């Protein structure tokens, strides 16, 4: 037996190619179903069994993909030519490496250009395999940051169009050999060449390549939310600027007006200080600075929050239980980089609900039937301590907002240096504010903070500081709103 590879006759090669494609599709469906099952409520034993099934399914899928790769190459580059949903293929290709990306704390982001047609003619399995191999390789080589997959329209000849694919990873490990250590990657690059594509930039950290696909004159009508949502205001809160940009582009393509924020503090200010309502608010579990459940509690005082349709964004494999999502006041939870279908469904369902927030309408100011504001402090007690002097109360509110940030910085620095004296002094300063405002939640947070510092349990101190910081932030956002409500006739 020699090491020479023998090419199968045409009919046999096509037969093997078709069989391996069917096996690959079935294996991919099994793998996807198992990942969806993992997102449901499971006990410990069930989750352990599903984990085993997931590992076996991923191994099977990799084996079948390699078989299909070799079948394609052995067939001399002959590919299937069927109509397929290009956007859905791209979404599927990103979902497979997503669990590995989340284990490493990476943001895996897909952008599908609105200029690209949804329907293409070609070999969907090969396009999916190329994208999956390259994304998977990039996830393997990236230490931290993000992996960004961008599909853009490049050119058209009337019967074909070219999709330009840009894949970029930040903070990438150096590597002297890309393909020798990853046969799947080598096969993917060979497939790009066999399909008539071009590798314009070979990474990592940057891949840029193009693949020609056929145009279909019978373009499928794209699913869109109802046109009635155009002009509505939407707020998106997530720490990733790239992910916010992707969501902004998708939402604005449907006529929505999008504002965004990176962290909980800016998000709370955008909600509590808004002079106009939001039709929808997307809150990410990965926003900076504040836990999403605590954020929800802090936003409860705002009428803007209650009037908006609220959606939670979370990593696909870490979606909270539906009961917890609804208990926190959200309509539903979506993946951070939601699929087109999931996002359209969410907005369509919201559009079908009673219209509680106008396009450009100012926020309700206590009209009959509106939700009465509730605060984490006793406003009447504070006003009594000011002798009924509202000007003095206004000065107190302004001073509180200006000094709270500096106080939190000193507290964080004291804990970082394990300085008990300085930390206790900051805690006492915070307690004085809690007593002045009759803020019971802030008092409870300070109690916990003092206990941790007194016994020098420094590993628990950051969480205690975060709790106190959250309550201070909550007060800082509530006070101006409460003062304005007190001044209404």
Image (cartoon, helix red, strand yellow):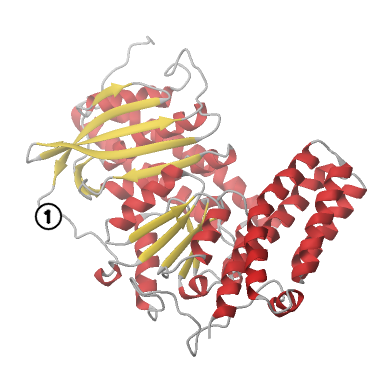
Numbered disc 1: secondary structure = loop
| Horizontal side, residue 54 vs residue 347: left or right | right
Measured from the top left, where is residue 409 in percent x and y? 70, 44
Give the image quarter of residue 218.
Answer: bottom left
What residue occupies the far bottom of the structure in this picture? 368
Read off the residue under disc 1: 218
Measured from the top left, where is residue 320 in percent x and y? 59, 60
Q: Is residue 416 above or below residue 349?
A: above
Identify which residue is drawn at 44% across, 45% down: 95
| Quadrant where the N terminus is found in the figure | top left
Taking the image as drawn, is residue 8 in sight? Answer: no
Q: Is residue 452 above or below residue 157?
A: below
Relative depth, front residue between 151 and 235: 235
Identify which residue is drawn at 45% across, 35% down: 147
Measured from the top left, where is residue 434 in percent x and y? 77, 65
Relative depth, front residue between 354 and 467: 467
Label 1 crowd (10 A; few <14 / some 14-19 / many >=20): few
| Horizontal side, residue 453 vs residue 257: left or right | right
| Horizontal side, residue 84 vs residue 311: left or right | left
What residue occupies the far right of the structure in this picture? 455
Identify which residue is drawn at 40% across, 56% down: 259
Give the image quarter of residue 3.
Answer: top left
Give the image quarter of residue 412.
Answer: top right
Relative depth, front residue between 405 and 77: 405
């Amino acid at each position: 037996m020699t090491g020479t590879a023998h090419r199968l006759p045409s009919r046999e090669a096509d037969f093997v190619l078709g069989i391996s494609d069917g096996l690959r599709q079935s294996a991919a469906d099994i793998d996807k179903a198992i990942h969806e099952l993992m997102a449901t409520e499971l006990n410990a034993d069930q989750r352990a069994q599903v984990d085993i099934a997931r590992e076996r399914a991923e191994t099977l899928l990799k084996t079948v993909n390699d078989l299909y790769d070799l079948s394609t190459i052995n067939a001399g580059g002959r590919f299937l030519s069927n109509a397929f949903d290009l956007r859905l293929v791209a979404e599927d290709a990103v979902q497979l490496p997503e669990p590995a990306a989340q284990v490493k704390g990476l943001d895996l982001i897909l952008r599908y250009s609105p200029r690209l047609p949804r329907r293409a003619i070609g070999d969907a399995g090969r396009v999916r395999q190329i994208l999956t191999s390259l994304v998977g390789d990039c996830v393997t080589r990236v230490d931290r940051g993000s992996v960004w997959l961008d599909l853009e329209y490049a050119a058209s000849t009337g019967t074909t169009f070219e999709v330009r694919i840009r894949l970029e990873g930040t903070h990438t490990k150096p590597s002297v050999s890309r393909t020798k250590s990853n046969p799947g990657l080598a096969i993917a690059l060979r497939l790009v060449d066999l399909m008539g594509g071009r590798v314009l930039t070979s990474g990592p950290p940057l891949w840029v390549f193009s693949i020609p696909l056929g145009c279909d004159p019978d373009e499928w009508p794209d699913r869109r939310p109802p046109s009635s949502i155009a002009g509505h205001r939407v707020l998106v809160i997530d720490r990733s600027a790239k992910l916010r940009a992707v969501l902004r582009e998708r939402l604005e393509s449907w006529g929505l007006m999008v504002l965004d924020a990176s962290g909980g503090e800016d998000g709370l200010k955008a909600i509590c200080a808004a002079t106009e309502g939001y039709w929808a608010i997307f809150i990410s579990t990965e926003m900076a600075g504040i836990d999403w459940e605590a954020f929800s509690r802090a936003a409860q005082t705002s009428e803007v929050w209650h009037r908006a349709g609220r959606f939670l964004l979370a990593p696909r494999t870490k979606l909270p239980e539906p009961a917890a999502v609804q208990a926190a006041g959200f309509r539903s939870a979506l993946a951070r980089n939601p699929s087109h279908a999931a996002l359209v469904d969410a907005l369509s369902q919201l559009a079908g609900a009673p219209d509680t927030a106008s396009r450009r309408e100012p926020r309700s100011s206590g009209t009959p039937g509106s939700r009465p504001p509730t605060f984490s402090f006793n406003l009447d007690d504070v006003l009594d301590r000011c002798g009924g002097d509202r000007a003095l109360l206004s000065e107190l509110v302004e001073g509180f907002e200006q000094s709270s940030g500096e106080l939190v910085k000193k507290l964080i620095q004291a804990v970082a240096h394990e300085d008990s004296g300085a930390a206790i002094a900051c805690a006492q300063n915070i307690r004085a504010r809690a007593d002045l405002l009759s803020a019971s939640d802030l008092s409870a947070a300070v109690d916990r903070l003092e206990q941790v510092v007194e016994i020098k349990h420094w590993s628990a101190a950051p969480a205690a500081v975060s709790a106190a910081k959250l309550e201070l932030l909550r007060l800082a956002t509530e006070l101006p709103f409460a003062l304005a409500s007190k001044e209404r006739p």
